[in-house]
Amino acid sequence: MNKTLPLLFLIGRPAAGKSEIIDFLKRVTASTRAETFHIGHFLEIDDFPMIWSWFEEDDILSRMGKPRLHTDKKGYFLFPELWHVLIRRLELEYWKKKEDGLLDADTTVIIEFSRGKEHGGFREAFANFSDELLQQAAALYIDVSFAESLRKNRRRFNPSKPHSILEHALPDEKIKRLYEESDWQDLSAGHPERLCLGEREIPYMVFANHDDVTSGSDELLGARLRECLHTLWKRAGA
């Protein structure tokens, strides 16, 4: 049994603590990351930079007097299918890294994203990943209430760095419309260890973050993350 997870979906509401977990994992030593957290040399694939590039392109097109390609003037997608395009882009990035020889037995790929019911939820997101990708994956869901997601989204916003992974935020109106309703409970109901995704099942674990340990001390975050990832690693090897 490999001591590290090959592919980890890191999912949850916006500002749930996903980026903070990745930042923490970057700061621990490689040996600790592998032995304690079952995460190898890791490569991160996040759809936020993809979304932000669409915003920037549309802004450039508008200033050129041309039609926007992806979003309206309020920043909402012109077509709901674009959410699924992002998922397929995430997978495309994975296979490109594999073709470039960047993935080996000691590598963990972390794919990070959020989805709300308004744009299909996690069920439709996972339906757009291939079975070939899902068969090697596990998922860590960061659990916070919408109220907590909204609070942390407001707190982290840095107007001088709207493109930043750790400091970007959504306006209240947008986060409520896109993410207030979540299908996570429906998707995981009755399946305490594995998500049923059509004919494929993938192991998952819930990281409870209602007390916001991802914004507190590394000691508390590390202890909870260690427990969650160790359990997930065992489930993945079962």
Image (spheres, grey):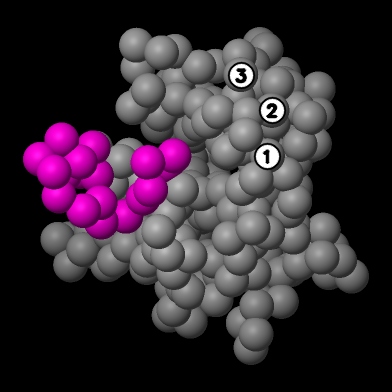
Residue with the most extreme front position: 65
> 9 above or below 48?
below
Q: Which mark is residue 154?
A: 3
| Label 3 with label 2: CB-CB less than 8 Å | yes
What residue did someone put label 2 on?
Answer: 150
> 146 above or below 118?
above
Q: Nearer the viewer, residue 36 or 90?
A: 90
Instruction: Please tell me which residue is depicted at 40% across the width and 59% down the height of the picture.
Output: 78
Q: Nearer the viewer, mark 3 or mark 1?
A: 1
Mark 3 is on which residue type?
Arg
Q: Secondary structure at mark 3?
A: helix
Residue 153, image quadrant:
top right
Residue 214, image quadrant:
top right
Region of the chain picked out in magenta, as a range? 57-75
Residue 119 visible within the image = yes
Q: Secondary structure at mark 2?
A: helix
Q: Which mark is residue 176?
A: 1
Instruction: Please tell me which residue is depicted at 61% across the width and 19% down the height of the picture.
Output: 154
